[in-house]
Image (cartoon, rainbow, N blue to C red):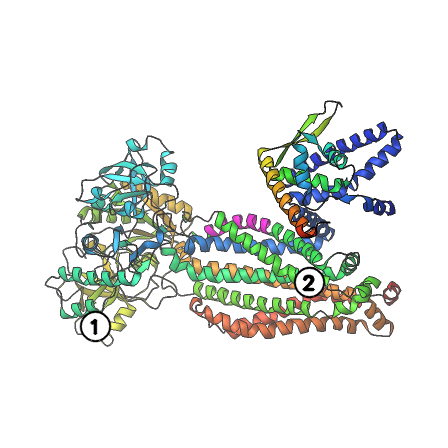
């Protein structure tokens, strides 16, 4: 029942009573009474109209609603009477609730929300989903070949359906038919069973089916995402007659996926899905459809109803061994077989998606959620304190009302309604704040130029969360003050508000709230200190290269028909290096497979005289001749690649310092040889130089064992063009791109970014945690200061009388200030005493997120304690000064 | 106040729970507004039952809420003014039968206790 309906029905009742009353009056008059008497008699016959109305409301079942609305109105009025308090309370609530909502929306999007598909809880992934790319390890359990997927699909007993997804997004420059410019497209290759297995049907047209995926190369069909249909095709209703050109193949668009379906990987949104059977036609042309050992797919299955995860795991592992043994070739050794026996394929639920972001952000998000929760608790404590102070001031009001017969439960209900009004207003502001915060956070986590495709919009579940938080905060901060306020010695309170000063100064509840706040603030402040110092340490890490003044470009020759293994690819790279190096302001240019934090190519090497058991994992980087110059990585010995190193000459390699120390501890490695892969591999490398160690994938990694290979001796796509320059970045960037287009105007450049951005991007998670925890820490301290300030001001105002007497009796001003300051020291000191052990315990929980600093770092904790003491005393200084300026005469006359 | 107490000795307030039945029965004659209903009950019982407006109007609204009567503003035939007329609905007619039979059972039960068959005076 809405309030306007009440109004309408009330008016109706009013009219009915009036008309009947007039009738009664007329009848009385007709009976011969004088007009006034008739009126009085009619009124008497009718009785109390207010009573009638109230009883009608009861009949309508609105009694509680009426009480509630009255309480709300009264609450709003009484909150508006103390605007300062209301403003402070609202601000802290809005910040607290807003921060919680914002962080929760990320937590929900990254960790909690289910995929928008049928029965997501039945979906499982083979492995853990932590790899992507192509593996050639023996019996890897993370990535699988297409033939493996088919064998599994045919022979398993536990999945009702199975599907596979190519683990790398294909970033292609394709053309919409009828347009002359290429545009970037994110293409995902999936098995034909992908859409049917997920139970996702097309919005327009049809999705892929297994028929599109049975034979290689002759099913040029594509399903497009709703977002891409909107963005690139302006929601063309005739989309099914459009075509796309990817590489040299024209694909028919056969369907549009539903709006809510973003794929199966949170944080990645494919524009286009093509069947696996077509993967070799899509640039860069991976041949992953037929090779038994071409492990580049995620395999997912839908559990049959009633099959447990344990049963499924057992069956899949059995199958895994059988399939692998059927792939046995002459290279399989006894050791390989033994390894296979030990291999275990874990099954991971992907109800909420295959999630690259989860690994990176789940712990930070949980920590931030905890931090915001604590901030909200501090805000609650603050408001509870404010309300407590106010309720003491309102003691008389409540005493009068109780004396007039108000029930205590009724008063408690009214006070709680006031809290609810406050919390609801805070909640509304909080949601508004959260919308802005979400945008800001999304911007902060998106490292590249594109915003991360993550849905953090405000939706039902989020509003429900906020509502729950709001109501529980209201109960949390409202209950105690309400109970306290209504528990009164009536006669005492009625005599004079001032005589209750005794209860005001002895406020164990208020004191313990302040102590709790201080303790919580200390935890947050120390945590923030640790995260900020970790970030500083990370920023100061020696990367081994100079991150300033380097541009990285990603040209994409695969999209204009260049094929892997073609000699003209190398000619193109050579030409790019030369043209770009000639650009004004460029000091060095070189292609490279990787610079920093761009993934890796891991492989095994065989070194003569070294036990193969330890000569395992090495990362390879394929580079141009000027790479070390462009990155400013010092060469410690030997030479770099030179023009005489060609496909025809002896294969040469440069190794990292760590590689040299590990495998050639006693001898000079220059001139020595090793094999990439097994001892019989054709890649016998001669070492020509040693480069200084560099950070390769992350700033906090241990030193990487790395070797560098010359692209002139290989034929393969290389992603990066590394350019060192002097002067203005924008001008150089434009000139460099123009130089590349001068070779081929159609050569797409996917991204242009600086090495510095790339390095900063690698610690985005740590930076966000540091920035947000610092913000929340300061917020907590700020709220605690308000709490201290308010409590002290209140105490001083209650004790004005006492202070006046003390001063009249000769107490110096300083001793009066000391009265206040001593109390603050006591409160902050107690808070610190509780907070320090709590901090030490909590910080241990985050020790794996720290870098270069121990969780129990004494300097950070001491600094936080000192900081809190200083701001606490500052907060108390104003009330203390006010106490010392009390004029004894005024204070005494006041009584 | 004192006059009211005196009156109460001569007149009985409507028994709890029977007011609904009385209103429904009154409306069986045709639509009527609140004042008419109250007057009718009072008059029919020779002023024995005292109608309190404080309970009449809430009762009417309760009946309307339950769908036993419907209400409409209509002009009275004798006076040139609109009154809120209540009408018995089909649901209300059924309810009247229910309440009537309940009341009969109640009255018979009370009578059996008060004037047992063997002790006829």
- The chain to which mark 1 is attached is A
Does residue A711 appear anywhere in the picture? yes
User: Residue at 25% of width from left, 47% of height from top?
Assistant: A193
User: Residue at 62% of width from left, 44% of height from top?
Assistant: B102
Residue A292 vs A655, above or below: the answer is above
Q: Position of residue A394 (x, y in %)?
A: 76, 59
Say which of A64 and A200 sits in front: A64
Residue A235 shown left or right of residue A507 in the figure: left
Q: Is residue A430 magenta?
A: yes
Task: Look at the image and give the residue range highlighted in magenta.
Answer: A427-442
Q: Position of residue A494 (x, y in %)?
A: 82, 62
Say which of A523 and A141 sits in front: A141
Residue A21 lies in what quarter of the image?
top right
**Residue beneath disc 2:** A483
Does residue A770 appear anywhere in the picture? no
**Residue beneath disc 1:** A613
- The chain to which mark 2 is attached is A
């Amino acid at each position: 029942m809405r309030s306007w309906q009440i109004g309408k029905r009330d008016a109706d009742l009013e009219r009915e009573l009036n008309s009947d009353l007039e009738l009664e009056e007329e009848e009385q008059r007709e009976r011969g009474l004088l007009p006034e008497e008739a009126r009085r008699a009619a009124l008497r016959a009718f009785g109390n109209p207010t009573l009638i109305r109230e009883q009608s409301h009861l009949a309508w079942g609105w009694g509680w609603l009426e009480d509630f609305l009255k309480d709300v109105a009264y609450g709003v009025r009484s909150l508006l009477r103390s605007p300062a308090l209301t403003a402070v309370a609202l601000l802290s609530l809005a910040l607290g609730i807003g921060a919680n909502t914002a962080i929760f929306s990320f937590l929900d999007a990254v960790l909690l929300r289910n995929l928008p598909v049928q029965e997501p809880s039945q979906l499982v992934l083979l492995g853990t989903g932590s790899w992507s790319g192509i593996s050639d390890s023996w019996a890897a359990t993370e990535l699988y070949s297409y033939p493996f997927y088919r064998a599994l699909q045919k022979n398993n007993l536990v999945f009702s359906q199975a599907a596979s997804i190519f683990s790398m997004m294909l970033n292609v420059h394709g053309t919409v038919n009828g347009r002359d410019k290429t545009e970037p497209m994110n293409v995902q290759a999936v098995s034909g069973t992908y859409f049917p297995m997920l139970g996702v049907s097309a919005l327009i047209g049809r999705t892929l089916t297994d028929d599109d995926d049975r034979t290689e190369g002759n099913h040029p069909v594509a399903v497009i995402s709703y977002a891409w249909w909107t963005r690139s095709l302006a929601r063309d209703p005739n989309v099914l007659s459009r075509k796309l050109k990817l590489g040299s193949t024209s694909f028919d668009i056969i369907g549009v996926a539903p709006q809510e379906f973003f794929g199966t990987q949170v944080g990645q949104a494919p524009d286009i899905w093509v069947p696996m059977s077509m993967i070799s036609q899509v640039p860069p042309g991976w041949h992953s459809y037929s090779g038994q050992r071409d492990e580049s797919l995620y395999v997912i299955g839908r559990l049959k109803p009633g099959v447990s995860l344990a049963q499924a795991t057992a069956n899949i592992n059995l199958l895994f061994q059988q399939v692998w043994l059927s792939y046995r070739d002459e290279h399989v050794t006894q050791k390989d077989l033994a390894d296979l026996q030990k291999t275990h394929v874990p099954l991971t639920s992907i109800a909420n998606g295959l999630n690259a972001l989860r690994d990176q952000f789940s712990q930070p998000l949980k920590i931030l959620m905890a931090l915001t929760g604590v901030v909200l608790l501090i805000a609650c404590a603050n408001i509870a304190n404010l309300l407590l102070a106010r309720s003491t001031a309102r003691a008389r009001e409540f005493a009068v009302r109780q004396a007039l017969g108000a029930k205590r439960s009724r008063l408690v209900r009214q006070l709680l309604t006031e809290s609810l009004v406050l919390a609801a207003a805070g909640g509304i502001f909080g949601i508004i704040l959260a919308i802005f915060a979400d945008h800001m956070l999304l911007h902060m986590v998106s490292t590249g130029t594109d915003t991360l495709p993550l849905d953090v919009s405000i939706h039902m579940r989020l509003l429900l969360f906020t509502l729950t938080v709001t109501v529980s905060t209201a109960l949390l901060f409202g209950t105690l003050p309400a109970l306290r306020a209504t528990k009164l010695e009536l006669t005492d309170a009625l005599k004079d508000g001032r005589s209750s000063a005794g209860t005001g100064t002895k406020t164990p509840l208020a004191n313990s709230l302040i102590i709790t706040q201080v303790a919580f603030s200390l935890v947050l402040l120390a945590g923030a200190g640790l995260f900020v110092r970790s970030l500083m340490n990370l920023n100061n890490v020696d990367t081994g290269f100079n991150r300033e003044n380097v541009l990285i470009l990603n040209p994409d020759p695969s999209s204009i028909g260049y094929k892997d293994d073609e000699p003209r690819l190398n000619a193109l790279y050579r030409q790019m290096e030369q043209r770009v190096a000639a650009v004004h302001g460029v000091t060095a240019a070189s292609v490279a497979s990787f610079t920093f934090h761009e993934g890796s190519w891991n492989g095994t090497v065989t070194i003569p005289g070294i036990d193969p058991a330890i000569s395992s994992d090495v990362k390879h980087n394929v580079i141009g001749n000027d790479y070390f110059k462009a990155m400013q990585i010092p060469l410690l010995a030997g030479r770099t690649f030179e023009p005489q190193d060609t496909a025809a000459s002896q294969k040469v390699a440069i190794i990292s310092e760590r590689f040299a120390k590990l495998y050639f501890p006693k001898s000079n490695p220059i001139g020595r040889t090793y094999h990439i892969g097994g001892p019989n591999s054709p890649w016998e490398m001669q070492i020509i130089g040693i480069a200084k160690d560099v950070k390769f994938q992350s700033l906090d990694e241990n030193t990487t064992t790395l070797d560098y290979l010359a692209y002139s001796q290989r034929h393969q796509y290389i992603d990066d063009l590394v350019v060192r320059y002097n002067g203005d970045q924008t001008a150089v960037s434009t000139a460099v791109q123009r130089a590349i287009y001068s070779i081929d105007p159609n050569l797409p450049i996917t991204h242009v970014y600086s090495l510095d951005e790339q390095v900063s991007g690698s610690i985005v998670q740590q930076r966000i945690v540091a920035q947000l925890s610092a913000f929340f820490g300061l917020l907590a301290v700020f709220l605690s200061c308000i709490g201290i300030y308010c409590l002290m001001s209140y105490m001083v105002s209650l004790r004005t009388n006492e202070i006046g007497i003390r001063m009249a009796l000769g107490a110096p001003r300083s001793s009066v200030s000391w009265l206040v300051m001593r109390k603050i020291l006591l409160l902050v000191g107690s808070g610190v005493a509780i907070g320090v052990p709590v901090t030490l315990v909590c910080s241990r929980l985050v020790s794996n997120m720290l870098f270069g600093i121990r969780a129990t770092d004494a300097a950070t904790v001491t600094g936080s304690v000192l900081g809190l003491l200083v701001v606490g005393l500052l907060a108390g200084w104003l009330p203390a000064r006010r106490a010392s300026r009390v004029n004894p005469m005024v204070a005494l006359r006041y009584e | 106040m004192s006059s009211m107490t005196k009156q109460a000795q001569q007149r009985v307030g409507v028994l709890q729970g029977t007011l609904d039945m009385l209103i429904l029965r009154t409306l069986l004659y045709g639509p009527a507004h609140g004042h008419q209903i109250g007057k009718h009950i009072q008059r029919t019982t020779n002023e024995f039952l005292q109608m309190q407006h404080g309970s009449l109007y809430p009762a009417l609204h309760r009946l309307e809420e339950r769908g036993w009567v419907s209400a409409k503003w209509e002009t009275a035939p004798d006076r040139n003014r609109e009154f809120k007329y209540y009408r018995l609905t089909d649901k209300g007619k059924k309810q009247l039968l229910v309440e009537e039979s309940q009341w009969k059972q109640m009255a018979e039960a009370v009578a059996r206790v008060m004037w047992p068959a063997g002790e006829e005076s």
